[in-house]
Amino acid sequence: MTHLLLNLRDRLEIKPPIDAIPHGVRVSERRSESHRYLFLLNPGDKSTQVPVPETFSDAMDGSACDSEVDLDPWDVRVLQERINHTPS
């Protein structure tokens, strides 16, 4: 079953929202017309660091993200990135 899913993922060019997601961390992505949002969840009982592109900022306070975001146990972070659209 794993082989089938991996093959399907590769054929459809499905990629995770970010590279190198730490074990146990959940990452979901949503998009609006102007932004890309990442929802980072750490349901574990240990702190962890999640590597993220520096183009993201914290959606709650607007602070810029470094190359890693710290997630405490049971922590949730929402990050945003502005999407550049060219007029059609």
Image (spheres, rainbow, N blue to C red):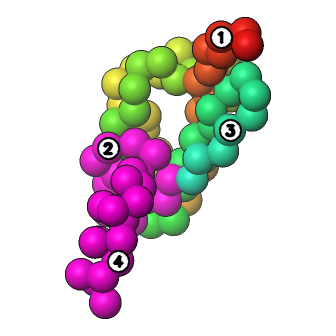
Name the mark on residue 19: 2
From the top left corner, tell me how far across and down residue 81 is, in percent.
Answer: 59, 24
How far across and how far down the image is residue 67, in percent?
A: 35, 24
The number of numbered badges drawn on the structure is 4
The residue under label 1 is which amino acid type?
Thr
Task: Place residue 5 in its image quadrant.
Answer: bottom left
* Camera-nearest label, 1 or 3: 1
Give the Cα distance between marks 4 and 2. 18 Å
Q: Which residues are magenta?
A: 1-27
Residue found at x 57% / y 41%: 38
Foreground: disc 1 or disc 4: 1
Q: Which mark is residue 60?
A: none
Whether label 1 touches label 4, CB < 8 Å: no
Is 10 part of what is drawn in magenta? Answer: yes
Mark 2 vs 1, N-terminal side: 2
The residue indicated by pointer 3 is 31
Disc 2 marks a residue whose amino acid type is Asp
Disc 4 packing (10 Å; few <14; some 14–19; many ≥20): few
Q: CA distance from mark 2 to mark 1?
A: 26 Å
The CA span between labels 1 and 3 is 16 Å
Question: Is there any visible trace of residue 10 in the rendered image?
Answer: yes
Q: Are marks 1 and 3 in contact (CB under 8 Å)?
A: no
Q: Which residue is mark 1?
A: 86
* Residue to which mark 4 is pinned: 5
Which comes sooner in the sequence, label 1 or label 4? 4
- Residue at mark 2 to residue at mark 3: CA–CA distance: 18 Å
Badge 4 amino acid: Leu
